[in-house]
Image: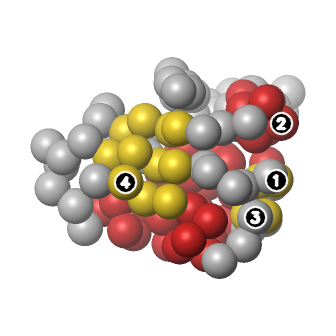
Amino acid sequence: MRIRLSKMFNTDTLRDRQSAMLVVERVSKLDRSASIVIDFSDIVFVSRSFCHELLSCLQSRGNIRFENVNKEIQEMMLASLEKPNNHLDYPMKKLVVC
């Protein structure tokens, strides 16, 4: 199953946690054994909050790949997973980017 974010949201920018939760809801409706591709084609910017919500909510699903992720989005994904100095149990996830 491929979820193309630019078509889902009709934009090239993803800024908020609510948008990430729409993706998570869509993924949660799919069979847990299904391979899922979250396609960032034509997305030029994502916020740290979008990335944090998306990655932390999908951390229990091992069959998700991210494709067509530009360098800036990849850096934002990694930054969203960095442990803040004031939070001991921040969720971490192995990031696989294609």
Q: Which residue is mark 2?
A: 72
Q: Is residue 38 above or below residue 94?
A: below
Residue 84 occupies quadrant = top right
Secondary structure type for disc 1 = strand
Q: Position of residue 94 (x, y in %)?
A: 51, 22
Amino acid beneath label 2: Glu
Q: Is tag 2's residue or tag 1's residue first in the polypeptide sequence?
A: 1
CB under 8 Å between callouts 3 and 4? no
Residue 2 bears which disc, if any?
A: 4
Q: Is residue 11 left or right of residue 60?
A: right
Amino acid beneath label 4: Arg
Q: Which residue is mark 1?
A: 45
Q: Is tag 3's residue or tag 2's residue first in the polypeptide sequence?
A: 3
Q: Position of residue 43 (x, y in %)?
A: 72, 55
Question: Which residue occupies 61% across, 49% down?
Answer: 40
| Mark 4 → mark 1, Cα distance in angstroms | 20 Å
